[in-house]
Image: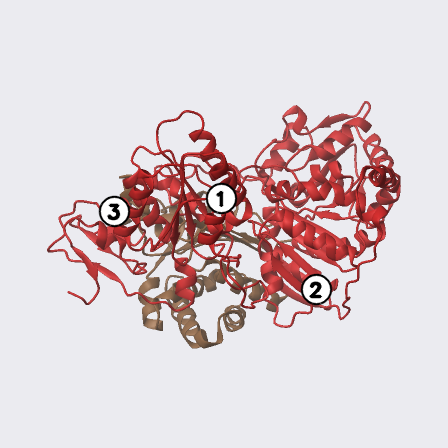
Chain colours: A brown, B red
Amino acid sequence: MNSSFDVLIVGIGGQGTILASNIIGEACLIEETPIKGVETHGMAQRGGSVESHVRIGGEFGPLIVPGGADLMIALDLLEAVRYRHYLKKGARILVNDHTVVPTSVHTQGLEMPGRDALVADLADFDLTMVDAAGLATEAGNLIVQNVVMLGAAAPSFPLKPESLEEAVRRSVPPKTLDLNLRAFALGREAGLKKE
Amino acid sequence: MVKRYLLGNEAIAHACIEAGIDFASGYPGTPSSEVVDTLRAQKEREFYIEWSVNEKVAFENALAASWCGLRSMVTMKHVGLNVAADPLMTSAYTGAKGGFVVLSADDPYAHSSQNEQDTRRYAHFAKIPCMVPASVQEAHDMMKDAFALSEAVGLPVLYRPTTRICHSKGDVDLGDVSEEHRTGAFEKDPTQYVVVPAHTRVLHKRLNEKQPAVRKAVHALGYNTAEVRGKAAVVACGIAASYVREVLPADVSFMKIGCFPVDPAWMEEFVRAHETVLIVEEGAPIVEERLRQLSCGVKVFGQMDGIVPKEGEFSPAVVADAMVQAGILAASPVPAPAAPAAGLPPRPPILCAGCPHRSVFYAIKRAFPDGIYPSDIGCYTLGLQLGTVDTTICMGASVTVGSGIAHSGEERPVVATIGDSTFLHTGIQGLINAVYNNAEITLVILDNRITAMTGHQPNPCTGETAMGEATVPVSLEALCRACGVQFVETVDPYDFTATLQVLKEAKARPGVKVVIAKQACVITAKRAKVRRGRYVVDPEVCTACGACLRFGCPAIGRDENDKAVINELCNGCGVCADLCPTGAIGKEGRR
């Protein structure tokens, strides 16, 4: 089947999955590695559950089949559990140690699983929890949690971390470059610690 | 040549620039919108571009540009092509002069659509060529060829990508931007452009006579390919071809259809060389219908016998499963998926924190607790989650469905909702009709000054063109009054009390009433640096009654003591403060 390294980035609309996938794409261009992917757009996805498929070395279609992903980056803990069936057995998974409670919990009176239950649901995988909010704040702004998570995942990619770092340089608005590079570096440290 | 990581729609837009496009128009619709959005974001632009009020208007504008010799394109989504179907059918008769490409993006699985119709049917119906890309690179290359093909055969060319092309990304080889640009000039020729019956009969005959040359030109492009490798074959079209290639064994033949009409002799030769043929195409069984006519004695599998799904979207797993059922694969190479986690609270798309629509819907529910609520196509369809959207059919249908219900003897009050862009698209005709025929409805125009759902394209309420030039915004109040509406009131939905009051006044009046709820989209306001400050809950005053939570704002949650708490998503609309019965919510720093 596929010879590509398949990455699933999941989160909530507005958290920056598209920027994260753009950075990976740019890193692939730098290394001259083919890349395909697909992402959620439209229908006011802000606040909704979103997924971005990225196939590094991919030569076929953009979709990752359930059970086929090599790596997951989750910008929200609940969303990590929602998409875990996309992963290969024992695949690596990096999860932001935080979840935004869906509005449906309040409006429909649904039950929200607790953090420990959600983490337990991911026990079969090579799991690393990342305090993305804390590290992003340390970098200078809460909004760079996506780049923190990407940094944390960097050691797990079949790409050189330097290529990813250069890709960050090329992909983020110039005004936010230092902020994003700090976020990437802090994330990378956190990812390496768990290796 | 330069390689870039691009969205399908961005690659398509770049191909238009490489082809030297002179004129582009469209109406936004997911997944097509980013094509024109990318074109209008170009810093140096030597072509005309517009977001039109609807697809028919956009189509006719671009067609006229083609008649003037310009390379033109019109974009829309599949359901939008229904709106433009009238000029489409006749444009095949009048033909194109400058390359004329009709981009209509299909949405298998209806990711953000009201149906799953197949645009390729329209091409067959109109007797014009259709191009269906299978990858982002091909989407780019085909778009460039589409302009030349249109000029070569003198016909509009339908270009049909799907969601997984438009919104997929890949490393794309781009060509050079064209330096060539044309100035349009219309050459009068009534026998060509005036479709009175005497001319039309000739034009129809000429269109039919063109068909063999069209088939030849399409085949010569090389997007339809076939490779014989064994006694079994798979035939695929569009993105499905990419899924097939991912799981295709080396000894199985493969035919890929990228352009229509397909040369029947070529297809027949391929089919007859096999014992088994499986056809994999998303949407309607268009290749399959043609192929089955030519298959005499060959075992054919596809949608028509239920081997391939007739609806929804394909994937490598779906394709592999069909190949197993057709006996082409012994077992699926796709891993058996683990079961998804069950019982998780869903996270559907919701109206943004501070969205003015939420407040209007909430007020409608209060003022018309027994109301019937026809609605329309836009972000506000998400009012479904607030219980104030009872029907949604297509653009403009809220007003017409509303008046239809009101004329049916229904006693409950009818309150229809429609956005500003949708109202101008096809809502206004319904309003004219409702007033003229004395319907008994309240129409609430949710006027957020922009076409928000598809990515904030300007519309005639915005006051800015697609080119970024300031222009005259339409007056919805004057427009509604000109339709004959006596009760036209404009409210600010952030003023909940006043909004509720005006809705109650409307309820008390007879006939057609229009309430214009005017407040800029919260995202555009944020981008324009409008800062309203945040709201906070005083936990000492909050009684945990949950009134604010029922408002459904994503900025409001509960703390560990079940009391309300407002998070960082708050955009400061302040409506929750109006709703709180104990006065526990107020502006940050004010208490």
* Mark positioned earlier in the residue sequence (2 or 3): 2
Q: Relative to residue B279, is residue B177 depicted above or below?
A: below
Badge 2 vs badge 3, beta-carbon distance below 8 Å: no
User: Which residue shows up at 36% across the image and 41% down it?
Assistant: B385
Tag 1 residue: B377
Disc number at residue B549?
3
Query: Is tag 2's residue or tag 1's residue first in the polypeptide sequence?
Result: 2
Q: CA distance from mark 3 to mark 1?
A: 26 Å
Q: Which comes sooner in the sequence, label 3 or label 1?
A: 1
B465 relative to B1 in the view: left or right? left
Q: Residue furthest left?
A: B540
Q: Is residue B484 visible?
A: yes
Q: Chain of mark 2?
A: B
Q: Is residue B543 shown left or right of residue B38?
A: left
Pinpoint residue B153: horizontal percent, then vertical percent: 84, 49
- Describe residue A85's horizontal placement relative to residue B225 as left or right: left
* Residue B17: mark in rendering: 2
Q: Secondary structure at mark 3?
A: helix
Above or below, comparing residue A184 to residue B29 in the picture: below
Instruction: Please report, as a chain letter, where disc 3 is located.
Output: B
Q: Amino acid at mark 2?
A: Ile
Q: Position of residue B495 (x, y in %)?
A: 29, 55
State how far apart marks 2 and 3 are (Cα): 49 Å
Give the amino acid type for the residue marked by disc 1 in the picture: Ile
SS at circle 2: helix
Q: Amino acid at mark 3?
A: Leu
